[in-house]
Image (cartoon, rainbow, N blue to C red):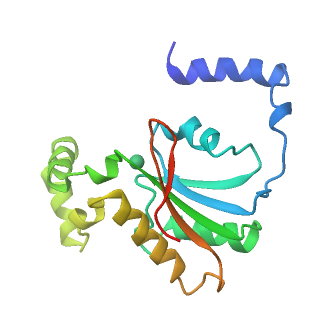
Amino acid sequence: MDTLNEVLKFNEQFVENKEYVPYETSGLPDKKVVILSCMDTRLVELLPRAMNLKNGDVKIVKNAGAVVSHPFDSIMRSLLIAVYELQAEEVWVIGHHDCGNGKVKPDQLIHKMEEQVTEEVVASLKHVGIDLHSWLEGFKTVYDGVSDSVATIQNHPLLPKNTPVHGLVIDPATGKLERVTK
Ligand SMILES: [Zn+2]
């Protein structure tokens, strides 16, 4: 049985047995916080457990590296919607050690893409002004990534003044948090 079918089969039982009841909550974050973190598999359960976060406590936005790559990207849009429409009053950026985003090698990745979708397709993007190299590039260290994203959010012209924006790094093995910005 493939993975999706397994999940759908489990889901029928989950709903039938009313296993959702302990998770009932509203769409608004009780702790008034929106978190930006990384899509790393080790953080799926560890991050909320290590922070004692329950369903309903916070909004969590995730991508590769917990980075805001552009002030008007979809991550920043989500953070602003959380603040303006969903009662989040602070933003926490939580990167992690051993993050794959620090290991991305754009040249190698572009080569793999060329093998899959042909060199012509990749070259055609260059012709319309898309700089794949800088788009794919990761951060040098997780501390740089978190600090840069915190700065982008903090200096965003649309973020309400005095919104606290904090930067942290989590250990994906132990869950230990380290504060990297004030
Ligand atoms: Zn990561």
Left or right of 15? Residue 94 is left
Q: Where is residue 165 in the image (x, y as percent from the top left)?
A: 58, 72
Q: Can residue 180 be seen in this view?
A: yes
- Whether residue 72 is visible: no
Identity of the residue furthest to the top in this view: 1
- Residue 172 in percent (x, y) is at 45, 40
From this view, report whether residue 106 is shown above or below residue 144: above
- For the point 84% across and 19% down, the residue is 17
Q: Nearer the viewer, residue 67 or 5?
A: 67
Q: Using the image, determine if residue 101 lies above or below residue 50.
A: below
Residue located 75% across and 65% down the image: 86
- The total of numbered circles placed on residues is 0
Residue 52 left/right relative to 114: right
**Foreground of the two, 108 or 150:** 150
The x, y position of residue 125, in whole percent, is 23, 64
In the image shown, does 7 or 145 lie closer to the viewer? 145
Which residue is at a point 52% across and 75% down the rendered structure image? 153
Residue drawn at x 62%, y 53% is 60
Q: In this view, does 159 lie above or below 148?
A: below
In which image quadrant can residue 18 be found? top right
Looking at the image, is 103 positioned above or below residue 24? below
What percent of the width, then of the height, locates residue 162?
A: 65, 83
Q: Which quadrant of the view contains residue 34?
A: bottom right
The image quadrant that residue 166 belongs to is bottom right
